[in-house]
Amino acid sequence: MLDRLAGNVPNTSAVVLVSLDFGDSDYAENLEELRQLTASDGLAISAIVKGKRSRPDPATFAGSGKVEEIKLALEQTGASLVIFNHDLSPAQQRNLEQHLRGRVIDRTSLILDIFAQRAKSHEGKLQVELAQLEHLATRLVRGWTHLERQKGGIGLRGPGETQLETDRRLLWKRVKVLKEKLGKFQRQREVQRRSRQRAQVMSVSVVGYTNAGKSTLFNSLTRGNAYVADQLFATLDATTRKLFVPDHRLFVISDTVGFIRDLPHTLVAAFRATLEETVQADMLLHVVDAGSPNRNKQIDEVNKVLKEIGADSIPQILVLNKIDLINLSAGGAGYGRDECGRITQIRVSAKTREGLEFIKLSLSEAIDERALQRCKDQSELGNVIDRYAALDYG
């Protein structure tokens, strides 16, 4: 189970993964996802420590015997970092680092680190920093026990303030600054959205599980150049482009950050401003990797996040992507309608562009339905006004 590295000289890019089975049916899939996350962070896996438990150990999560196994893996491989495929409490993380005499992070910290590497825009970097600081705030005590006693800090601390209190105060001061800056971006987007609404331009948001092919689909539809890579969280910064469909109809379409199982709440909160493009959309294109054995679970996870951000009531079209890689019994590209005649599911290959015309067809029908509903609402309003005008108040 241990893949040895050269000697046991500490290797800063080598890691030991820890994944414990608590009886979940998707244990193997979750472990594979951790492998992909680790690779996306540019780290080399030197060993994987597995085990079965009925419940997490309160002190070390893994239990004393498993901790010794992890320690042995570190010594044999020269790895310098341990990554748990679970969320650790601050106390568990601190205890593990004391026992292992090395760095230990959990799944949330790994995802945050990937986001920190991938954010390109100024707003994206601010959002990632905010998420990191809010996550750090919950475990600020870790590593600071030797600073609990008061020290000199000219210009920083008040009477009786400890180093830990100072750090916590400075951290929340920075959080406040970041939230104010992100608030400005949010107001700018609100102005842009109001302008689109006045022009009656329909907005579409591309959502889905990470690495489902959202950015590839976005580029194929808009002839855009959003960053594409076969890795988790290749796209962090929301991109918005114009999209023209037959009959010269104009849409605004946005590519958004991918979702993942147990997406850290700090990330959902920090990226809420960007995800408002999703909340304010008229239609969602929910992109799914058609060949993934976990696609139903991934659909549920995306819908769970959509509900958390208040976007679960927005009409969505399920886009089964990557049909070029699988054999579908339905026969390649195509679409399906519900009992009301609306297109609700489309099979496409964003890479080969097969089936993209069906997405444009569904959007064209959606805007026709929207226009029909608007006329109906205006007609009903006119009837109400006429009825009131005809009343005799004499």
Image: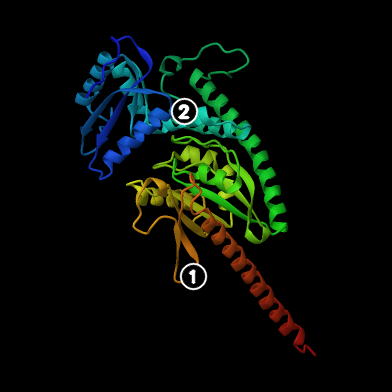
On the image, which quarter does residue 91 sit in? Answer: top left
Q: Secondary structure at mark 2?
A: helix
Which residue lies under the disc numbered 2? 113
Is the residue marked by circle 2 packed among few (<14), some (14-19), or many (20+) residues within 10 Å? some
Q: Is residue 190 visible?
A: yes
Q: Position of residue 221 (x, y in %)?
A: 57, 48
Q: Is residue 346 above or below residue 382?
A: above
> Where 296 falls versus 134 (above or below)?
below
Q: Amino acid at mark 2?
A: Asp
* Residue type, numbered disc 1: Gly
Residue appearing at x 29%, y 28% in the figure: 18
As helix, strand or loop, the secondary structure at mark 1 comes to loop
Question: Is 88 situated above or below 156?
Answer: below
Whichever of callouts 1 and 2 sits on the residue coming sooner in the sequence is 2
Residue drawn at x 24%, y 23% as measured from the top left: 67
Q: Residue at x 39, y 52 (%)?
A: 300
73 relative to 35 in the view: left or right: left
Query: Can you see residue 275?
Result: no
User: In the figure, is residue 79 to the left or right of 68?
Assistant: right
Residues 355 and 133: in front is 355
Q: For the residues carrying marks 1 and 2, which lies nearer the camera in this image? A: 1
The one of 381 and 164 positioned closer to us in this rendering: 381
Q: Is residue 63 left or right of residue 84?
A: left
Residue drawn 45% across and 15% down? 147
Q: Quadrant of the C terminus?
A: bottom right
Q: Which residue is mark 1?
A: 341
Residue 136, percent across and down? Answer: 47, 28
